[in-house]
């Protein structure tokens, strides 16, 4: 049996364990084991290096496949997002247009109702506006045709226009209350509720 003893290295407080070999056989067996261990290590290094290149190529391929797949999926998602955004913008524009149209119709309806009430109460300012428009487009002896909303027509046919022009009044259903059209042989004019609002 091998005996074990301890030596102390000068200047170092750590103890180092050493083994005494009983004979040459033990020493030779240890050398062979060490040599075999070194051979195994070299073989592992060689196979690892060869395997490592194969693995590197495999991993590089996989990375490229993942990149290509990611790029493809990213492009698809980007296109889907772009399409969704376009749809949202289109829908919001449509909604905004519809909302604007509804608001305009409501405002015109309200203005028409208010203009009609004012015309019913005091028709003279409205007849004055018609006369001013007629004078701008007609000569002194022209006959002027005036188109009005049917309710305004009922009120204005009873009014006498003393401005030297000859008027004929006609009802036109697509005109709102407070709107009118004036036609002469030379020209024509249409006055909407917005024109009346600006003129007041």
Image: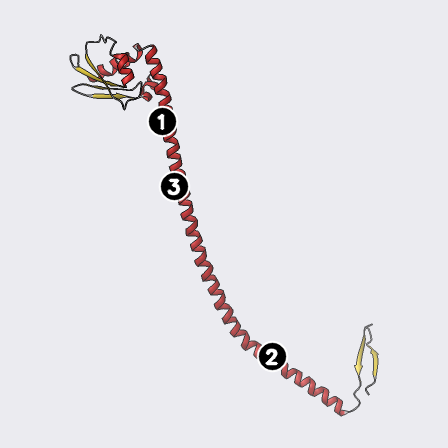
Looking at the rendered structure, the secondary structure element under dot 3 is helix
Earlier residue among tags 2 and 1 = 2
* Residue annotated with mark 1: 105
- Quarter placement of the N terminus: bottom right
Closest to the camera, between mark 1 and mark 3, is 1
For label 2, count other residues whose C-alpha is less than 10 Å away and answer few (under 14), some (14-19) or many (20+): few
Quadrant of the rendered image containing residue 153? top left
Answer left or right for 2 relative to 181: right
Looking at the rendered structure, the secondary structure element under dot 1 is helix
Closest to the camera, between mark 2 and mark 1, is 1
Q: Is residue 22 above or below residue 167?
A: below
Q: Is residue 191 above or below residue 97?
A: above
Quadrant of the rendered image containing residue 192? top left
Q: Residue furthest bottom?
A: 24
Q: Is residue 73 above or below residue 200?
A: below
Do the residues bearing badges 2 and 3 touch, measured as CB atoms within 8 Å? no
Do the residues bearing badges 2 and 1 touch, measured as CB atoms within 8 Å? no
Looking at the rendered structure, the secondary structure element under dot 2 is helix
Distance of mark 2 from mark 3, alpha carbons?
66 Å
Which one is in front, 28 or 163? Answer: 163
* Residue annotated with mark 3: 90
């Amino acid at each position: 049996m091998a005996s074990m003893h301890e030596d102390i290295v000068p200047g170092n407080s750590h103890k180092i364990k050493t083994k005494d070999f009983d004979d040459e056989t033990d020493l030779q067996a240890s050398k062979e084991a060490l040599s075999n261990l070194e051979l195994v290590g070299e073989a592992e290094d060689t196979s690892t290096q060869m395997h490592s290149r194969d693995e590197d190529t495999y991993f590089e391929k996989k990375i490229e496949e993942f990149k290509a797949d990611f790029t493809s999926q990213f492009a698809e998602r980007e296109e889907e997002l772009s399409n969704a955004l376009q749809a949202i913008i289109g829908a919001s524009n449509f909604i905004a247009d519809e909302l604007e149209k509804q608001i305009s119709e409501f405002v015109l309806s309200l203005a028409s109702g208010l203009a009609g009430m004012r015309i019913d109460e005091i028709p003279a300012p409205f007849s004055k506006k018609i006369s001013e428009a007629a004078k701008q487009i007609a000569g002194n002896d022209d006959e002027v045709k005036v188109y009005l909303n049917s309710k305004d027509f009922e009120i204005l046919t009873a009014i006498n226009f003393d401005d030297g022009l000859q008027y004929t009044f006609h009802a036109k259903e697509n005109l709102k209350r407070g709107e009118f059209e004036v036609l002469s042989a030379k020209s024509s004019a249409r006055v909407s509720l917005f024109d009346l609002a600006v003129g007041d």
